[in-house]
Image (spheres, rainbow, N blue to C red):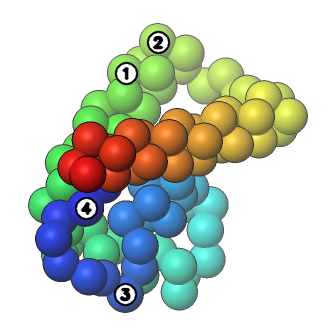
Amino acid sequence: MSCGQPHETDCREVLAEVYLYLDLECGEERRVLIREHLEECGPCLQEYGIEQEVKALVARCCGNETAPEQLRERLRVRLSEMVVFETTESRELAD
């Protein structure tokens, strides 16, 4: 994902960590970097908005249930892979 402007924090990194950011599971320094990136980058902010809606929907449907740590880690890895794949695919289409 690219918005045409370089950022201190790469878009792929931000999107890979958006759930950690939403869940307040990353350190304060990282939260600041992600928040600043989201404020500057329209495409990432749009993606973040979508992620927030999905998270809210899951919270409403699942109540207070907590996923096992192994499942959470597998989901984080899979989401990271999807972001890398999407970025690679976008670059190939641009070429």
- Disc 1 designates what residue? 57
Quickly name the residue at label 3: 8
Q: Amino acid at mark 1?
A: Leu
Q: Which tag, 3 or 4, sits closer to the chain's start?
A: 4
Q: Give neighbour class at mark 1: few <14, some 14-19, many 20+ (Cα, 10 Å).
A: few
Label 1 – label 2 distance at C-alpha: 6 Å
In the displayed structure image, the side of residue 82 where residue 69 appears, left or right: right
Q: Using a 10 Å C-alpha cutoff, classify the residue at mark 3 as few (fewer than 14 neighbours), some (14 to 19) or many (20 or more).
A: few
Decide: is 45 above or below 60. below
Frontmost residue, 65 versus 57: 57
Q: Nearer the viewer, mark 3 or mark 1?
A: 3
Q: CA distance from mark 3 to mark 1?
A: 31 Å
Q: Position of residue 15 (x, y in %)?
A: 43, 54
Q: Measure the C-alpha gap from mark 4 to mark 2.
A: 33 Å
Using residue 33 as the reference point, say whether residue 77 is left or right of it: right
- Residue 75: % across, % down: 67, 34
Q: Are marks 1 and 2 in contact (CB under 8 Å)?
A: yes
The residue that appears at 50% across and 65% down in the rendered structure is 13
* Viewer-nearest residue: 41 or 31: 41
